[in-house]
Every structure is written in structure tokens, then in C-alpha cells.
Image (spheres, rainbow, N blue to C red):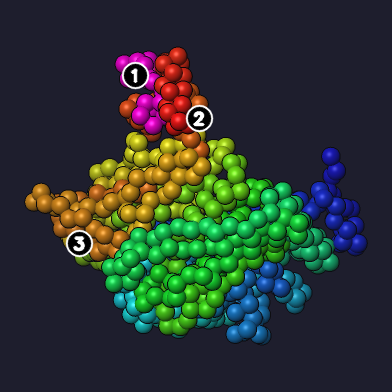
Amino acid sequence: MRKLGSNTNARVQEDANLDPVLLAIMANRMDAICREMTNTVLFSARSAVIGIARDFSCAIITAEDEVLSVAEAMPIHVFGMHLQTASMSKHHPAFREGDAFLDNDPYVGNSHSADHTILVPVFHKGEHFFTVGVKAHQADIGNSQPTTYFAAARDVYQEGALIFPCVQVQRDFKNNEDIIRMCQRRIRVPEQWYGDYLAAIGAARIGERRLKDFINKYGAKAVHKFIENWLNYSERRTTDAIQALPSGQFVAEAEHDPIDKYIPLGLRIKADINIDSDNGKITVDLTDNPDCVDAGLNLTQATATMSATQAVLCCLDSDIPHNSGSLRRIDVILRENCIVGIPRFPHSCSVATTNMTDTIINAILAGFTQLGDGYGFSQGNMCNGAGTGVCSGKDWRMGGAPYVNQMFMSAGGMPASAQNDGMHGMVNPVSVGLVYRDSIEVNEQRFPFLVDCVRALEDSCGAGRRRGGPASEVIFGPRQDEMLVINISNGLINVPQGVLGGMSAKPGFQICLASDGSRQVYSTDAYCHLMPGDRLHAVDNGGGGYGDPLDREPERVLSDVAERYVSREQALKVYGVIITGSGELDDLAVDIQSTESVRLSRKTATQT
């Protein structure tokens, strides 16, 4: 093993020749810096949506506005940060060391207004090398309604969010107190927001210091060479993965549920996909879709581009580095004034990180299975139901002080692939399993509500040779005072689909169980007013199945029954597997002979 001592560092700084070992070491150091920034936010943020659910991401962007390192960041957060750093340079061409900028403008590169992004440029001997970005979903942003997912907003004015188009929030490492006061005046829980701001700015400054150390260690020339080599390597890896695919063109489609007033008939989203294996290029065309709507469902340029890109990357080699180098081989074509394109001001983009992005991702994941068995995925949970709603009210324990909290108590089922079952705990496709599920105990300590139930649901998975992940059930309600839960869901009608013979998942639902025994069913765009004693019962989607359920190995079905993902009744009805035993885990077994007989008769009947 080669030892990297001081002599090696001196040689690297002198000739800037990077062998593969050193390239990997430097790339992993970049990821380590992102992870240190991530841990800083996670352990110091004030709000539950950031400090518990981890709805934030950190990234390192080059001075040439290329995303370099993201570690475990959510793609929808970070793959558009190069647009934000370009905006920083445009609006502040004389930016300097000690500056920091706050950006949440959905019209110039941000994801949506709820995601406050801190950008800090990093200098070495007067030269701008990097920009660190910390993007965090706020608990409240001053919307006219107490939610950061305001689907009912007919335009940005009705939405009411405070929007900062890359404004300077620090100069010489000191806050611009005017901006701080603006946020504290308009945001409903100002102390919570300010704590989250300090966590983000602190993480960005830590990233700045670590990158300075990185440049000092290897030298400016070597760092420039590393950036060039690492992005080129990532591009080559992506090219190789695409060239391993069959060439072809296909249309991928998925359906969003109807929403009264906005999309009363629902909305079918199309993605025209062209795989050019010879040239190692994939093009996703989203232009043949409806115009922007007078609601908060419109995507931004960043979220439309990156939802398609995320889905394509999921269908390639999982070991490909995710940065602007790999993105060079994936073209996403958008048009202006399209609901999944480039929004035209003043259309609202309040919900630009969930509903339509999830629809695009599910469409493309399942669309890739048109290449044949072994490619693509089924569809995953698309129900952002009440378990992931925004709750608000007044807390009698704090003298009637207001609270606002984006919850992540639902988990949802991941899609299945040709090789693997879907996991439990994706939240939704755009989260790719990176958002944490809330701690129930911490939620009950912080907020005045009680949680009766959070569990995975039996028989909610889409069956297949590989099954989807299970859906989740949440039941909760206020302790004493009225509580409002606002959410914009999907998957109540159009459910995650199975592929290549796999079965679809079940629809979600959300019902208020009133204290007087009455029941109120909520539709997609829900405002759930809960009185003391009421309970909100919410169920999301499992993932769809991949392949024929009759081809699933009986021992896998037995394991699912033991884990209570699948009932014994469904094991027989859907999978053709006969389970024997009394029901105790140690007593369960597969009747192999009877199972083979049942499966053979069903397959014969299907063929005839």
C-alpha cells in the first residue's frame, strides 16, 4: 500500500499528477466534508423537519458552477445547486471571502420556496475555488397558510412565502440583520427558524474551513486537476453504464390523482426517453405535458430536471459518482410554462419537490422495464398523506405559543427491482429513502399531540417475484387544543403500479375519526381540522411488484408471512404458497409439494 506522507504531498503540489489511488482519496475527502456539514445540521437544527426527519442536504459546487460532491444528499436538493451558484455570481459579481447568501427563489434555480439555501464561496489566496451549499426545508416560510406545501395557492402572491433571490445574508462573516429581522417578523415561529439558520450557516462555515485545509494540503494546481479528473471519471462511468443498455426509444407515463379545482380529471405525465447506447447518452423529453396550472403543483427548472435525472441514475450502475460529470450524459428537455418544466412567473411552485416529481420518477423507473426483465423498477409510494402533513396550532404547555411542524411519520414502500424487494421507509420516490422517519417520542415531547399507532401494514405490498415495500399506517390527534393538518397527497386513486406481471399496491386514505363517532374522508388536497378527542387515520402506499408472483421463491414468501408483511391468506391467493403451522414463528413452514401443485395448475390455466 502506498503511503501518502509529506513528501508525496509536496510532489503532488509540484506536478499535479493524480494517480487513481490519490484521486479516490481526494474524492472521498470531499464526501467526508459533506458528511461533516450534514452532521452539523442534524445535531444543531431546531426544527423537527430538519433535526429529526433530515429534510436537508449539503453539497460542494465548483467555481465553474458544477456540482462536485453530494455524499448522501437528496438529488432533488443538490443537483440544481449549480443554477443557484450561477445566480449568486450574476447578482453579486464582486462576492468575496466572508460572504454568505440566502436563496430560495424557485424561478432562478432553487427547488421550491420552502427550501432555504445558504451559499458560502470558498477562497484560497484570493481565488474562488468552491461554493458550499446547505439546503434545508423550513418548518415555516411565512406562507399565507401554515404550510410549506400550499397546493391551493393560485399564484406566488397567494402563496405568500418570503422569497430571497440570492440575497446577501452575511458580509465579513457577520449577519445582515435586516434580513434576519425580515424572517423573524414574518415566519410563525421565529426562534425555531433562527436556530435552523444558525445550524445551516454553521455547517457552511465548517465546510469552508475544511475545503481551505484541503487546498492547503494538496495545493491549488492539484485541486484544479482533481476537479477536472473526477468529473471526467464520473462522466466516463456514466457513459459505460449507458452503453451497457440496449438502445431504444420509449414513452414512460404515470398518473396523478384528480384534485378538485386544479386538475379535476387527474393528470397524466409523459416522458419520452431515448437511449443512445452507441454514444452513451440518454435524453428525457418532458415537453409534451400540460401547461402550468393555477396551483402550487408546478415544478421548477431544478426539480423538473433533477427528478428525471434521479430516475435515470437509479436505473444505471449504483456505484456511479453523482455529480455534474455524470449529469453530462443525461439531457432533460423542458419547455417554458409547463407543469413539469420551467415555470412562468407568477405561477406558484410551492409543491415542486413532491407530487409531480414523484409522478415523473415513478413513470421513468417503470418505463425502463420496457427494455426487458432485469431493467428498471416498479413504482413506489406516491402518497404524501396526512402522516407527512404540516401540523399547526397553539401549545397550551407553552402559554398558547404557536407551533408549526412538517411531520414525517409515514414511511411508505419502495419499488421492487428485478433482484430486490422494496424496502419499508422510502417516504416517497423523490426522497430515495434519505429522509428519516420522525421519532414518535420526540414529536410527542415537542408538540401537543399524541400518536396512537405507527406500523407497517400487512398485505399492502404490491406482489411480484420481487415485492414492493409495505405501506404504513398512522393514527394521531391533538391532546387538548384544536390542531390543523394540511397536506397534498396522491396515490388515493392512482396507485403505484407493478411491472412485468407484478401487481399494483393498494390506494392510500385519510379519515378523521371524530370523538362523536362520525367519520370524514379527506381527498387529495386536505385541510384536516382536528378537535380534542379526534384522531386522524392515514395510510400511504406500498410499492408495486416486479415480475410474476408465482415465480417468487417459497422461502421468501414464508419469511414475509413470518414478518407479517404478507398474510397466510395472501400467500396462497396471490403467491400460490401454502404455509403450514399454528402461526408461531418457529412453527411456520412451506408445504413444498402442495405449493408446487397449486402453482403448476395456475400457470397451466394462464397459458391456456
Q: Which mark is residue 539?
A: none
Q: Nearer the viewer, residue 204 or 366?
A: 366
Name the residue: 38% across, 28% down: 571
Name the residue at 34% across, 39% down: 457
The answer to whether residue 568 is left or right of residue 18 is: left
Residue at which label 2 appears: 551
Please identify the residue farthest to the left as the structure is shown: 516
Q: Reading the chain from its start, which is encountered first: label 1 or label 3?
A: 3
Judged by depth in the image, the label closer to the viewer, 3 or 2, is 2
The residue lying toward the viewer, choosing from 44 and 129, is: 129
As measured in the structure, the alpha-carbon distance from the residue carrying label 1 to the one carrying label 3 is: 42 Å
Q: Residues within 10 Å of mark 3 (few under 14, many from 20)?
A: some
Mark 2: few, some, or many residues within 10 Å (few <14, many ≥20)? few
Is residue 606 among the parts visible in the rendering? yes
Q: Amino acid at mark 2?
A: Asp
- Judge by depth and name the residue closer to the eye, 215 or 140: 140
Q: Specify the segment rendered in magenta.
A: 571-588
Q: Quick one: label 1 or label 2, which is nearer the N terminus?
A: 2
Where residue 182 appears, as percent x and y from the top left, is: 40, 81
Q: Residue furthest front?
A: 608
- Residue identified by numbered label 1: 584
Dot 1 lies on which element? loop
Q: Which mark is residue 529?
A: 3
Secondary element under disc 3, as helix, strand or loop, is: strand
Q: Quadrant of residue 178?
A: bottom left
Residue under the image location 17 percent in, 55 percent down: 520
The reply to whether discs 1 and 3 touch (Cβ–Cβ < 8 Å) is no
Asked if 52 appears above or below 564 in the picture, the reply is below
The amino acid marked with disc number 3 is His
